[in-house]
Amino acid sequence: MVKKNACVFISGTGSNLKHLINNSRDYNFPVKISLVISNNPSSKGLAYAKKNSIPYLIIDTKKRNFEISTLNKIRKYKISIICLAGYMKILSKKFILSFSKRIINIHPSLLPKFKGLNTYARIIEKNEKKTGCTVHYVNDRLDDGKNIIQKSFFLNKNDNVNILKVKTQKLEYLAFSEAIRRIYRYS
Ligand code: GRF
């Protein structure tokens, strides 16, 4: 099958990137991870790009023209979908409109609940019964676009921030790839 090109944006550990790379090896997976972009030169996730010989780009979001040069790179690699996997910067409305193809994000809560940062601590503080993760389309508002998939689980009394993170990320690794499969199956 002819795979579409995907670009994954990261800022940190890159465990979602790692799973996307592994899952994309499947012959039937609709995309190939063709480019990795990080705004953080010491992002651990860059090691996965290097290890798998995937081209990567480190961007300096303080530079005035960084969005233009990022878009140029994305065009050069004929990217059909951008996957935000722990990318800790907000994409500008201009960037989103200029790309004009799909941009998706993964968030560690059942959106629209708990948009934004410090998600796990807020979930525990609010005594939520159920939580999970969401893969959604990106628009110019934070954690706001249409949901593609959610996966959930019930909290235990002893769950703390670290346990919640482990449980949620286990579901994220499944949800991200499932969302991509879903997008291309229905398009
Ligand atoms: C993920 O848990 C995701 O929900 C959030 O950032 C985290 C990134 O983790 N947006 P990693 O870099 O993929 O390990």
Image: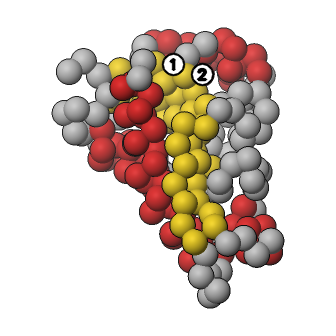
152 or 49, which is in the foreground? 152
56 or 186, which is in the foreground? 186
Where residue 168 sits, quadrant-wise, is: bottom right
Where residue 162 sits, quadrant-wise, is: bottom right
Point out residue 73 in the picture as x, y percentages from the top left corner: 51, 18
Point out residue 148 in the picture as x, y percentages from the top left corner: 54, 37
Residue 10 visible in the displayed image = no
Point out residue 177 in the picture as x, y percentages from the top left corner: 40, 42
Identify the secondary structure beneath mark 2: helix
Point out residue 131 in the picture as x, y percentages from the top left corner: 63, 63
Reply above or below: 153 against 51.
Answer: below
Residue 165 visible in the displayed image = yes
Q: Quadrant of the N terminus?
A: top left
Q: Residue at x 69, y 48 (%)?
A: 111
Q: In this figure, what is the number of numbered marks?
A: 2
Cα–Cα span, label 1 and label 2: 6 Å
In the image, what residue type sits under mark 1?
Answer: Ile
Q: Quadrant of the C terminus?
A: top left
Q: Residue at x 36, y 26 (%)?
A: 185
**Circle 2 sits on which residue?**
70
Task: Report the side of 164 relative to 17 (left or right).
Answer: right
Q: Residue furthest bottom?
A: 158
Is the residue under label 2 in contact with that under label 1 (CB below 8 Å)?
A: yes
Q: Residues within 10 Å of mark 2 (few under 14, many from 20)?
A: some
**Circle 1 sits on which residue?**
74
> Mark 2 near ligand 1 (CB under 8 Å)?
no
Identify the secondary structure beneath mark 1: helix
Reply above or below: 167 against 143.
Answer: below
In the image, what residue type sits under mark 2?
Answer: Thr
Q: Residue at x 40, y 52 (%)?
A: 174
